[in-house]
Amino acid sequence: MTPPSTPLLEWMGGAGEGDLIDEAFVGDGWLEEAFARPSAGAQTPSVDRTATEDVALAEELARVVSLERTMRWAQAEQFRLVESARVRHARLEGVGEVSTAAQREFATRSFVAELATTLVVPEATAGRLVADATRLAGPRAATLAALAAGELSGAHVRSLLEVTSTLPGEAADEVERVALMDAGSRTSAAFRRRLHRLRERLHPESLSDRHARAALNRRVALDPAPDGMAWLSLFLQADRAVAIMARLDALADAGDPKRPDPRTTAQRAADVAADLLLSGTLDHPDRLLAAATGRVAGKIVVTVPVLTLLGVSDEPAELDGYGPIDADTARRLAGHAPSLHRLLVHPESGAALSYGRTTYRAGADLAGYVRVRDGGCRFPGCARRATTTDLDHTAAWAHGGRTDADNLAHLCRAHHRLKHHTGWRMVHEPGGTIRWTSPAGHHLTTHPERPFTPVGRPGTPLPAPPAPPPTETDLHEPVEDNDPPWLHARAASLAA
Ligand SMILES: [Zn+2]
């Protein structure tokens, strides 16, 4: 592919809400025309205009347009190369004519990891790039050609892929065909609205069938926000969502009007929602579930620096699964924790770091040490927290690998499987540094989240607790994890 020579068919960013752009801006030579005939009244008499300035401005704008066109072409070229590299990488992973769907899936995941670590982007981003590239090389080839020609922006392409991905083949082809006819004259926002209207018109399925399927994706999501705050969102049926909001608004206004309350209505609604979710009970036909809502509280883990806990310093604490929280909140959580473990043990004090080969499961001290050291999944760029990951033997236990801090690392389920089923290799170095090698031979290093001063190996291993024989099942089970006796006081608090 070579960069296109046709001019852009869109006035970048200037159209706002309008669906259609002025005809003068569409077609060959619009830029020259637009600047050759300034509209009446557009000129402020007090501004000193010179012909040189006008020419310079027109040249700069023409250059901006030309660069945009080149970037769009480059984006199309990148999609093409990503798909080509994916096919090549799959061959490297041994995928051939007779490979199973699972083998192909692992090869794709391995390539996504390769791309994510090469571009230093989250795997979700790389995964989307790979999936988009595959579709643009196949059924959406016309869209790729329009991007390469500079007629569409990356945002247009994203919207088109998103909307057509939720349509059956023929309807998707029709939406693409109609949408591309005049895509260049619409801003990406207007193009998106048009796509949604086309989707509704051309969708062969009824809205109720689609709703039933969409409802299968309902879930709760937590998104960290700055300043010790976070968003908790529910993706659920619109009728329930609207009813919840109405109930919260009504409850926010239900208090005694004579009681002074400095909170705004919005603050009261947020507080009522949080209180209901944290301690509300449920009237449910499943009696075990109904009873559980009365006594199950959410367990949260906070790592508090000792001096903060003592009130001497205001160094922030760490809320597991979120990040830094302010000292006052941390002290409040630590103070109210019914089972606070104030463990001020120095790391050099000799907690057992090796259980040798007598047991497969890592002991609680060791598991806690590795969990605090790793913080989360040790695959390059992965952000999954240690609470949801597996503790993996770098060198397999079955092949002589020790249950030892230098041979244990946290991997999330996806990366744990990637390590076992694809060409990704890891080498564990003392102190917790891990060196990875990708199937393409790319070298990457991940460092522990909290490196500890190396601790002398205990001379005598602790008496081994009775251990179950090692099985493959054990490998995939998360290790039970107690609070580790390290440098920081750790407060395991019941959210109250
Ligand atoms: Zn991971």
Image: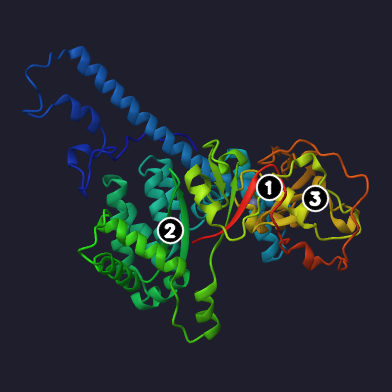
Task: Indicate which disc, 1 or 2, sits on the residue closer to the N terminus.
Answer: 2
Q: Which residue is disc 2 drawn over? A: 232
> Which residue is at 46% across, 55% downward?
140
Q: Earlier in the sequence, mark 2 or mark 3?
A: 2
SS assignment at label 2 = strand
- The CB of the residue at mark 2 lies under 8 Å from ligand 1: no
Q: Which amino acid does label 2 sit on?
A: Leu
Q: Give the CA separation, mark 3 to mark 1.
A: 17 Å
Q: Viewer-proximal residue, 403 or 173? A: 403
Image position of 56 (left or right of 356) = left
Where residue 291 sits in the image (x, y, percent)?
52, 80
What residue would you read off at disc 3? Answer: 394
* Kind of element beneath mark 3: loop
User: Which labelled disc corresponds to residue 372?
Assistant: 1
Whether tag 2 and tag 3 are in contact, CB under 8 A, the answer is: no
Where is residue 66 drawn, in percent x and y? 36, 29
What amino acid is at disc 1? Answer: Val
Q: How far apart are marks 2 and 3 (CA)?
A: 36 Å
